[in-house]
Image (spheres, rainbow, N blue to C red):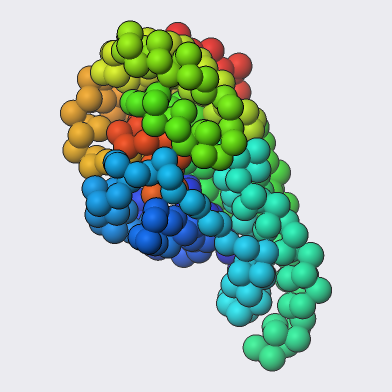
Amino acid sequence: MRIGLVVDSACDLPLDYLQRHDVTVLPITVRIGEAVLADHRDEEATLEFLHAHVAERGAEAETMPFTVQQIHDLFIERLVIDYDYVFCMTITKSRSPIYDNAQQASFAILNDYKPVRAAAGNNTPFALRVIDTQNLFAAQGITAVEAIRLRDAGEGAPKIRARLENIALHTHGYMIPPDLYYLRARARKKNDRSVSLLSATLGSALDIKPVLLGYRGETRPAAKIKGFDAAVERLFKHAAREVEKGLMTPTLCLSYGGELEHMRALPGYTHLIEVCKAHNIEVFESVMSLTGMVNVGKGAVVVAFAAERTPEFT
C-alpha cells in the first residue's frame, strides 16, 4: 500500500527533511498590508519576510489556510493518484480552521476520486484520515516524524492511525514568547482574549516570561520566570530531564522565530543536545513557520516531545 503524508506549513520541521520523505505541505498564506507570502516552509523566504515585515507589523497580519476547495483539488489532482491511503496531520483544531477544512474536504474527495484513479489505471479503493495533532508548531512535528518512521518501517494504515492518534494525546509543546505586548496585540487581532492588558503590562515591566504548554488542544501557562534567557534555560533543562526519564518516541523538536544560530547560543541548549545524543533521541531544529511567527512574535522558542506522564513543568 502506498501511504502518503500531508502536513500544514505551521508544522515546524526542516523543509529538506519533509522533501526527502515526500511529505506534502498545505501552505498557509500570510498577508501584512500589501505584502503576501504563501508559506511553503522555505526558511530563507520566511526569514526575509520576517526582517522586512513581521517584526514591525506582524500583529496586523492575516493568515489564510488552504480552503476546503483547495484541499479537495490537491487530493483529486495528485494525491489520490500517487497514494492509496493518506494521513493529513493538522495544527490543533482549537486554533485553526485547517482541520475542519480538511475534514470537510475529505467527504467530497472520497466521493470524487474513483474516476480519477480509474483514468490513471488504478481501480483499487482510496482512503484518507485527517489527524488533529492537538498541538502547534514544533509539537506538530512529533506526530509527523512518527508517521514517517512507521511508514518507512512498512507498517499498515490501521496501526499507523492508532499510533498517531495516541501520540497526539501525549505530545507536550512548550513555548516561550519574548514579547507579551506583541502576543496580546496579535490575540486581539484574532479576538482571542487569553492575554490581558494587565498581564502584558506586568509581565513586560517585571521582565516576566511565561512558559506556555500546548497539550490536548489547549494552551495554558506552565510557569512564569523572570528573564527570557533564564526561562529558556529552565525550559531546556526541563526537556533534558524528560528525555532522561524516557519518551514515547525517539524524537525532540525545536523551533525558533529567527535564525537558528541565535537559538543555539541560548543557555541550556548545549546540555539539552548532549542529553538527547546520550539517549539516542533525534533532534529536529527548524525556523518557526511564518504563520507561527506572526502569531507569537519574533524570537519565540518552542520545545516538543511525547511522553505518557502528566505534563508538569519542573
**Which residue does the image show at 39% across and 26% down from the upper left?**
181
Can you give x and y, in whole percent of width and height, for residue 258 in the image?
27, 41
Q: Which residue shows up at 70% across the image and 83% down it? A: 117
Q: x, y (%) of residue 16? A: 34, 58
**Residue 157 visible:** no
What is the x, y in percent for residue 243? Answer: 42, 22
Residue at position x 65%, y 38% from top? 94
Is 188 left, or right, of 230 in this rendering? Answer: right
Question: What residue sits 46% from the left and 64% below the top?
Answer: 22
Q: Nearer the viewer, residue 10 or 280?
A: 10
Q: Nearer the viewer, residue 313 or 291?
A: 291
In the image, residue 169 sits, relative to residue 202, either above or below, namely below
Q: Quadrant of the N terminus?
A: bottom right
Q: Position of residue 149 (x, y in %)?
A: 50, 49
Seen from the viewer's position, the closer of residues 185 and 107 is: 185
Q: Is 169 situated above or below 32?
A: above
* Quadrant of res 303: top left
As displayed, is residue 198 above or below residue 292?
A: above
**Res. 264 visible in picture:** yes
